[in-house]
Structure formats: structure tokens, C-alpha cells
Image (cartoon, helix red, strand yellow):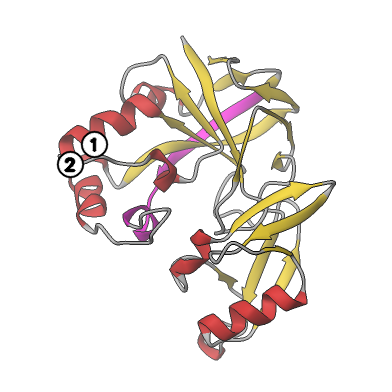
């Protein structure tokens, strides 16, 4: 039997997120998740989302909701608002024009809920011969209590996660983001190579929301 052991929400796409004890799961995923994103204004990427692949220091900014608004802890320890001043700072860092976009449900790469089985991460770490921080996979729900890769068998089926009902749509194909240490951005390219060679470049499963509901740490997850 799987259970939720960690819940993570990322108010701003590609920034570090906030760990929660519970959260409402809406039709757009976890309430407030990836509601905000930066749109790239560089000529060769105009209109595309600006993310870690363009500027990996983004993952060292930590976004959270406080009193209904987003605040961001910068790498130098300052707590700032999600506003034009922060946009200016990131434009200077990345040397490209940016626009902040507020679009609930519109800033996802795929489906709105990503689940990671921590047993699969542990098995992968043993294969890699190194510690692998599960935060590299930027999931919403981290689970324990099932065998490695057991979650793959959920694809095409509906599962219960707390009070919410989800349809497991596909495995999550990973990219270079998993090679970056979430705290230091130091690269470990061998992790992606291993994932390609042994796991079809996948870790975790994507879900769409069939029925909204609240999910909390300790809740049962399963078919």
C-alpha cells in the first residue's frame, strides 16, 4: 500500500518549491502549483517558457505562498515579492528580456500532477552508485510503501490520492534538469545517461485530475 510522505508545490515554474502537509488538488493540479512562469523574450525563443534549461540558478530561488501571495527567497537570503523588481534581477542575471505570466493550469510541461515512488529513486541511486536527492525530480507527491517501478503499472488506470481521484496518463520523460543538484546546481550528467540506458529516460508518472479533493501526508494512494 502506497502512502504520501511528501507534498511539494512550486508556485513559480522552475524555482524551488515549498513542502506542505496538505493541499487541495484542483482541476489545475495542486492549488497554486506552477501558476506563475517567466516567458522568454530572447529572439530565438520568443514566447517560450523560460526555465532551468536556460538558466539553472532559477532552481536556487525558493517560492512559497504567504497570506495568499507569492514571496521568493533569493539565493543571497533576501525575501522579496514576485514583482517587476525580481523580473529585472533575473533579466540582468540571464541577459535576456523576461515577462512574468500568471496562468493557472497553463504552465505545465505535461499533465498537472507528477508522482514519484521513492523506492524507484532508491533503486536508481543504487544503480548509479551515488546518493540521489529525490528533489531532483520535482514531483508533487512522493510515495512510499510500494516496490520499485510498481507505479508504472498504474499507467492507464485511475488512482485515489487522499480525497482526489487521478488518472495516470503516462510515464514522465526526464531531461537535463535531473542532472542538476537542487541546492548547488552542480551537474551530474551520468544520471541522465543511466536513466536513458536502463529506464527509457523515465522516472515518475504524470496524472490528470478526475475528481478534485484534498491530499495530506499519510494519505493512501492506490488503484
Q: Does residue 54 appear to the left or right of 108 in the view shown?
A: left
Is residue 182 covered in magenta? no
The disc label shown at residue 10, or none = none
Q: Quadrant of residue 176?
A: bottom left
Q: Does residue 11 appear to the left or right of 179 in the view shown?
A: right
Position above or below: 40 against 202: below
Q: Position of residue 117 (x, y in %)?
A: 41, 28
Residue at image point 60% right, 53% down: 108
Q: Position of residue 147 (x, y in %)?
A: 32, 17
Residue marked by disc 1: 125
Query: What's the CA distance linking mark 1 and mark 2?
Result: 5 Å
Q: Residue furthest top?
A: 1
Q: Does residue 202 appear to the left or right of 79 in the view shown?
A: left
Residue marked by disc 2: 128
Nearer-the-camera pick, 220 or 173: 220
Residue 17 visible in the picture: yes
Residue at image point 25% right, 39% down: 131
Helix, strand or loop for disc 2: helix
Position above or below: 177 against 148: below
Is residue 171 covered in magenta? yes
Position above or below: 127 against 45: above
Residue at image point 65% right, 22% down: 216
Q: Position of residue 217 (x, y in %)?
A: 60, 21
Which contiguous range is marked in magenta? 165-179
- Residue contact between numbered discs 1 and 2, judged by CB atoms under 8 Å: yes
**Dot 2: few (<14), some (14–19), or many (≥20) neighbours within 10 Å?**
some
Residue 99 visible in the picture: no
Q: Residue furthest right?
A: 67
State the predominant SS element of the stretch in magenta: strand
Q: Residue furthest bottom?
A: 43
Residue at image point 68% right, 82% down: 88
Amino acid at each position: 500500500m502506497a502512502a504520501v510522505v511528501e507534498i511539494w508545490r512550486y508556485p513559480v515554474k522552475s524555482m524551488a518549491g515549498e513542502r506542505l502537509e496538505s493541499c487541495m488538488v484542483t482541476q489545475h493540479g495542486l492549488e497554486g502549483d506552477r501558476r506563475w512562469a517567466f516567458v522568454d523574450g530572447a529572439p530565438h525563443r520568443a514566447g517560450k517558457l523560460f526555465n532551468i534549461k536556460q538558466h539553472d540558478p532559477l532552481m536556487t530561488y525558493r517560492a512559497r505562498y504567504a497570506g495568499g501571495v507569492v514571496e521568493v527567497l533569493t539565493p543571497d537570503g533576501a525575501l522579496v515579492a514576485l514583482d517587476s523588481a525580481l523580473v529585472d534581477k533575473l533579466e540582468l542575471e540571464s541577459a535576456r528580456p523576461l515577462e512574468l505570466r500568471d496562468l493557472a493550469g497553463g504552465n505545465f510541461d505535461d499533465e498537472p500532477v507528477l508522482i514519484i515512488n521513492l523506492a524507484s529513486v532508491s533503486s536508481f541511486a543504487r544503480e548509479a552508485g551515488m546518493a540521489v536527492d529525490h528533489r531532483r525530480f520535482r514531483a508533487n507527491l512522493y510515495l512510499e510503501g510500494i516496490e520499485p517501478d510498481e507505479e508504472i503499472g498504474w499507467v492507464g488506470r485511475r488512482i485515489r490520492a487522499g480525497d482526489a481521484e487521478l488518472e495516470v496518463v503516462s510515464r514522465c520523460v526526464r531531461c537535463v534538469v535531473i542532472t542538476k543538484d537542487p541546492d548547488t546546481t552542480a551537474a551530474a550528467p551520468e544520471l541522465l545517461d543511466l536513466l536513458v540506458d536502463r529506464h527509457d529516460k523515465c522516472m515518475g508518472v504524470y496524472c490528470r485530475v478526475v475528481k478534485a479533493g484534498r491530499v495530506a501526508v499519510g494519505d493512501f494512494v492506490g488503484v
